[in-house]
Amino acid sequence: MAVDLKPSDPFFLFGRPKVWLPPPWHTSDDRVRGGSSRSSLSVLPSNCALFEGHLDIDTLGGAGFASQFQSAAPHNDGSNSENDGIWDLSAYKGIEVDVGAGDGKVYTLILKNEEAQDKREDGREKAGINWEADFRVNNGGENPTGEEAVGKKVWVAWSDLKPTYRGKKKEDAGEFKPGEIRRIGFMMRSFFGTQQGDFRLELRSITARKLASEGADTTVNIQE
């Protein structure tokens, strides 16, 4: 029987009542293109996840990326519908990422409607369309009220997601389908050499919501 969620009730994809692992998240770093960046996603004792690694931009001449992805498991969606590896989040208005300690860098949330692409002859996955939103996380210090500022909730409405193909805008991608989300991920990228080095982001939870939480940060796609 389907669960009738009230508008203020979030659906947890990861974190709090839901586990981050298993299964392990899939690594997709620039090493598949001959780069040297690396990333991982592990679970902390608090049931938060830690996305961390090193972004190298020297090997590929200023470019670089490191990312982690997870696929939807069967029956793992907000509507409790019968499905095969799809999050049906059509009843919601967007995704909220509750982040803890960060490092001041810009991160990218990625959602995918497409199924995983077949492998190329060299073993790399064929490129597909990403639906992306960039956000920045503070690195501690004090906020304007004088209180310690560590973490925040980042609200990404479906309309905030921008389609890309191989890192470039895809103008003819059609519309994002919140009822057919197959994978979700986080990426650290160089933005043409503007950031590099070690990175570390604590993830408390990922939820689908009908309304953004009070005080949630709606400032996304700050690189545009």
Image (spheres, rainbow, N blue to C red):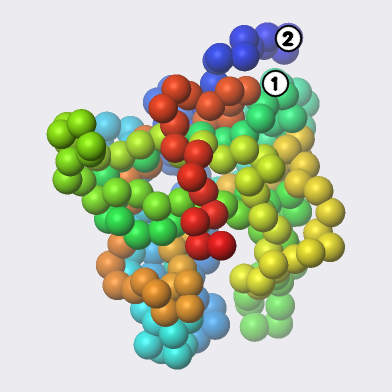
Disc number at residue 28? none
Query: Could you say where residue 67 lies in the image, as x and y percent from the top left?
Result: 48, 61
Residue drawn at (48%, 45%) of the image: 219
Residue 43 visible at all? no
Residue at 44%, 56% in the rendered image = 107
Quadrant of the rendered image containing residue 15: top left
Tell me the amino acid under the disc marked 1: Asn
Q: Amino acid at mark 2?
A: Met
- The N terminus appears in which quarter of the rendering? top right
- Residue at left offset 44%, top offset 22%: 214
Q: Is label 2 in a helix, a strand or a loop?
A: loop
- Total marks shown come to 2
Which of the two residues, 36 or 130, is positioned nearer the viewer here? Answer: 130
Residue 189, position as x, y percentages in the image: 46, 68
Task: Work out whether 109 lies above or below 150.
Answer: below
**Mark closest to the chain's N terminus, 1 or 2:** 2
Residue 143 is left or right of residue 28, and the answer is: left
Q: Badges 1 and 2: C-beta atoms under 8 Å apart?
A: yes
**Crowd rating for badge 2 (residues with CA inside 10 Å; few <14, some 14–19, many 20+):** few
Element at label 1: loop
218 over 111 or under it: above or below: above
Q: Position of residue 84 (x, y in %)?
A: 75, 37
Instruction: State the residue position of label 1.
Output: 80
On residue 1, the disc is: 2
Residue 164 against residue 30 in the figure, above or below: above
